[in-house]
């Protein structure tokens, strides 16, 4: 009976891998942002390279701007194998592993260079496989950039956030981040954020320069703080059962394509964030607020209780590894 079950399981998994005999394997890539963002461009580049190199074996369909699934239901769609590739922000994975919450800890990383160093080292690479028990396999980290605070008033000091409502992704760390400041954290899908800002349901948010610009938040967020307080990164993920059912040769080629795309996405993210910041500054619609070294340290100290609250869940070894990649001693 055991051998019969094993044989049936292998046959089921092989069905995906041999699908090319009846036609190309279909990979649906769903995401929630615009085509002209780093993630959006990465998805299109992935499609292009796969068609060039594996066109007879693999076909890719890209669905941007929540046109197939929104950020509230895309992960369940992945688990159902209704989509095969997603690149959700790292905050979305807390229900599958608490370890990835390290990227949400405010003011943990000095800058994007520190994030890069962490993701390339052992602890960062191990986190890619931290959700395989839930049938989710991480393939790469994609940057969008460091997060900036925006609001209807300047946030020069931590106390200035008290009493305001901020849109957040569904993340216990981000919820604690704003509650620790005496602010209200409101969980909303990315696609609903602009309307919530327009209506006054929330008065602030946090995002990368490229998203702040591309989502046209400027008219309703007159103050944007160059806080670089957190990491808005994505993890390119796939359904584990689907991925390991592919033939070895196809996976190897897809891995190589993903490496190329990741390099391009991360370079593009840095360039687009610089450009978006410059355009926002020149728009005349927002005031960019800079933090002095002392002001930034005040924010950092105000967030220490959040680090302490989640150390047990994330793991002191992971937080320690993250601190070690910074240029300064923590």
Image (cartoon, helix red, strand yellow):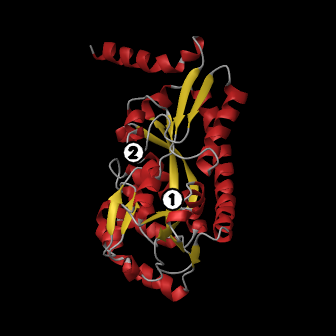
Front tag of 1 and 2: 1
Mark 1 vs 2: CB contact within 8 A? no
Q: In the picture provided, is 223 more to the left or to the right than 102?
A: right
**Disc 1 packing (10 Å; few <14; some 14–19; many ≥20):** many
At a point 39% along the width and 36% down the height, the residue shown is 135
Q: Is residue 60 visible?
A: yes
**Disc 2 packing (10 Å; few <14; some 14–19; many ≥20):** many
Q: Locate residue 151, reporting x and y percent.
A: 46, 70
Q: Quadrant of residue 256?
A: top right
Give the SS element for disc 2: loop
Q: In the picture provided, is 236 more to the left or to the right than 201?
A: right
At a point 65% along the width and 62% down the height, the residue shown is 276
| Label 1, label 2: how far apart the Cα atoms are | 19 Å
Q: Indicate which disc residue 131 carries.
A: 2
Which of the marked residues, 1 or 2, is nearer the chain's N terminus? 2
Residue position for label 1: 232
């Amino acid at each position: 009976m055991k051998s019969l079950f094993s044989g049936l399981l292998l046959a089921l998994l092989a069905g995906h891998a041999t699908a090319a005999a009846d036609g190309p394997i279909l990979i649906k890539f769903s995401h929630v942002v615009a085509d002209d963002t780093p993630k959006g461009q990465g998805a299109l580049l992935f499609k292009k390279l796969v068609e060039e190199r594996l066109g007879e074996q693999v076909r890719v369909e890209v669905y941007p701007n929540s046109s197939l699934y929104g950020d509230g239901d895309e992960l369940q769609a992945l688990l159902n194998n209704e989509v095969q590739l997603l690149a959700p922000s790292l905050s979305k994975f807390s229900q599958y592993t608490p370890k990835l919450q390290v990227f949400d800890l405010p003011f943990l990383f000095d800058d994007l260079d520190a994030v890069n160093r962490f993701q390339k080292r052992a602890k960062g690479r191990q986190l890619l496989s931290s959700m395989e028990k839930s049938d989710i396999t991480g393939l790469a980290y994609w940057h969008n950039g460091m997060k900036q605070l925006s609001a209807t008033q300047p946030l020069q000091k931590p106390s200035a956030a008290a009493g305001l409502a901020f849109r957040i992704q569904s993340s216990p760390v981000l919820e604690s981040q704003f509650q620790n400041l005496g602010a209200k954290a409101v969980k909303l899908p990315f696609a609903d954020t602009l309307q919530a800002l327009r209506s006054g349901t929330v008065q602030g948010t946090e995002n990368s320069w490229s998203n702040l610009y591309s989502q046209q938040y400027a008219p309703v967020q007159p103050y944007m703080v160059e806080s670089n307080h957190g990491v808005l990164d994505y993890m390119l993920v796939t359904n584990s059962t689907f991925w390991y059912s592919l033939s070895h040769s196809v996976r190897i080629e897809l891995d190589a394509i993903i490496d190329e795309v990741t390099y391009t996405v991360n370079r593009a993210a840095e360039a687009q964030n610089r450009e978006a910041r410059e355009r926002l500054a020149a728009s005349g619609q927002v005031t960019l607020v800079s933090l002095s070294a002392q002001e930034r340290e005040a924010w950092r100290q105000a967030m220490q209780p959040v680090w302490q609250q989640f150390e047990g869940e994330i793991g002191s070894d992971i937080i320690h590894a993250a601190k070690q990649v910074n240029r300064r001693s923590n």
